[in-house]
Image (cartoon, coloured by chain):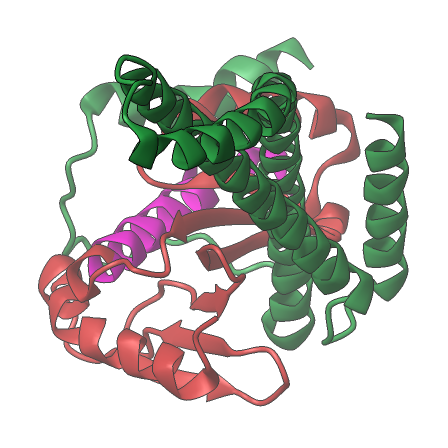
Chain colours: A red, B green
């Protein structure tokens, strides 16, 4: 498994590629405190939400948090689930999922992934999360 | 293998019990080490059995060659020795052939169980890591959707975009 520093280093090295993909100047990388290495990639000058990278041993997980169970309109819940399943195969490099009561978009990378691979994964995930929040907003409480 | 399913269930239960704790249950590492050692020992036993079989066949060939020249007194004693060795090894070789096949089967099964076990462990690790990351990082409220910047044009097909655009309307209309 990658340690805290190695994961942070990998994320930092992916920054130039990520900036290039997204066309965004400022992107911050922070290591969150805790026993498990979690790196936050945030976009302070943009309305994109943060992405979190963690090491799960055989894979690096990149997670974007979308909304919580409580945010979903009850009557639309089944339709939302179906829509997410329908969309999963066609969303590039990411899948919808749920961790506890958080709906998420997750991308997984090999621990041997290159810096370019990570930059592409993060850029795509950020884009997917933004699109999902916009286009699936009708399922959510305002 | 029933015994293995029991072990797997036990390890899964232990993983469940550990939940979002930082450490992996020690039984997981023990089970992995045990399976790896078993596979390694089976592989060694198979190699030894094959070596014994080869030795036996070599002895047999040597004896046959000497047997063509039994008149030579200097080989007589050697021939007697070889005869004894081959007699002993031939029984061994016959049993080794069956034994090697059995070992190969068991080794393949253990290796397949090891792969299954490792896959289960990796899935459990990913679930635990995702939960831990969520505990550390998840926002308390949903981010507000926004059109925001448009700096990024990826290799996203128009059909995917259309599916995303259509999705809520299509499903929402049904509800």
Q: Where residue B31 sits: x, y (%)?
A: 75, 54
Name the quarter where the C terminus of chain B is drawn.
top right
Can residue A103 be seen at all in this image of the molecule?
A: no
Residue B140 lies, with reference to residue B175, above or below; the image says below
Q: Magenta stretch: residue A54 in it?
A: no
Please identify the dominant SS of the magenta region.
helix
Looking at the rendering, the stretch of residues picked out in magenta corresponds to A118-140
Q: Please name the residue shown 18% across and 53% down the image.
A: B150
Q: Is residue B52 left or right of residue B105?
A: left
Name the quarter where the N terminus of chain B is drawn.
top right
Q: Where residue A137 sits: x, y (%)?
A: 52, 40
Q: Where residue A101 sits: x, y (%)?
A: 74, 51
Residue B41 lies, with reference to residue B109, above or below; the image says below
Q: Please name the residue shown 27% across and 26% down the image.
A: B72
Of B167 and B99, which appears nearest the observer?
Answer: B99
Of A92 and B75, which appears nearest the observer?
Answer: B75
Q: Please name the residue shown 54% across and 32% down the image.
A: B85
Of B94 and B106, which appears nearest the observer?
Answer: B94
Q: Please name the residue shown 29% across and 69% down the image.
A: A46
């Amino acid at each position: 498994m990658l340690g805290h520093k190695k994961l942070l280093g990998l994320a930092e090295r992916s920054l130039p590629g990520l900036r290039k993909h997204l066309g965004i100047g400022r992107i911050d990388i922070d290591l969150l405190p805790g026993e498990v290495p979690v790196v936050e990639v945030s976009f302070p000058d943009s309305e994109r939400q943060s992405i979190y990278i963690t090491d799960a041993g055989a894979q690096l997980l990149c997670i974007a948090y979308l909304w919580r169970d409580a945010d979903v309109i009850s009557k639309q819940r089944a339709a939302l689930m179906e829509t997410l399943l329908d969309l999963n195969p066609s969303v590039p490099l990411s899948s919808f999922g749920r961790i506890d009561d958080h709906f998420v978009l997750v991308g997984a990378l090999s621990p041997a992934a290159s810096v370019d691979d990570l930059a592409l994964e993060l850029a795509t995930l950020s884009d997917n999360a933004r699109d999902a929040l916009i286009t699936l907003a009708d399922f959510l409480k305002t | 293998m029933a015994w293995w399913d029991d072990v797997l269930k036990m390890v899964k239960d232990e993983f469940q019990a550990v939940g979002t704790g930082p450490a992996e249950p020690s039984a997981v590492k023990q089970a992995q080490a045990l399976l790896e050692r078993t596979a390694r020992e089976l592989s060694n036993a198979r190699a030894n059995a094959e070596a014994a079989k080869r030795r036996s066949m070599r002895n047999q060939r040597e004896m046959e060659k000497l047997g063509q020249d039994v008149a030579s007194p200097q080989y007589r004693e050697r021939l007697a020795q070889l005869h004894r060795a081959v007699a002993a090894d031939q029984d061994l070789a016959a049993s080794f052939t069956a034994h090697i096949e059995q070992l190969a089967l068991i080794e393949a099964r253990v290796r397949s169980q090891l792969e299954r076990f490792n896959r289960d462990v990796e899935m459990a690790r990913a679930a635990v890591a995702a939960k831990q990351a969520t505990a550390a990082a998840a926002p308390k409220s949903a981010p507000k959707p926004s059109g925001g910047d448009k700096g990024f044009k990826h290799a996203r097909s128009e059909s995917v975009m259309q599916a995303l655009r259509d999705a809520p309307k299509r499903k929402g209309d049904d509800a």
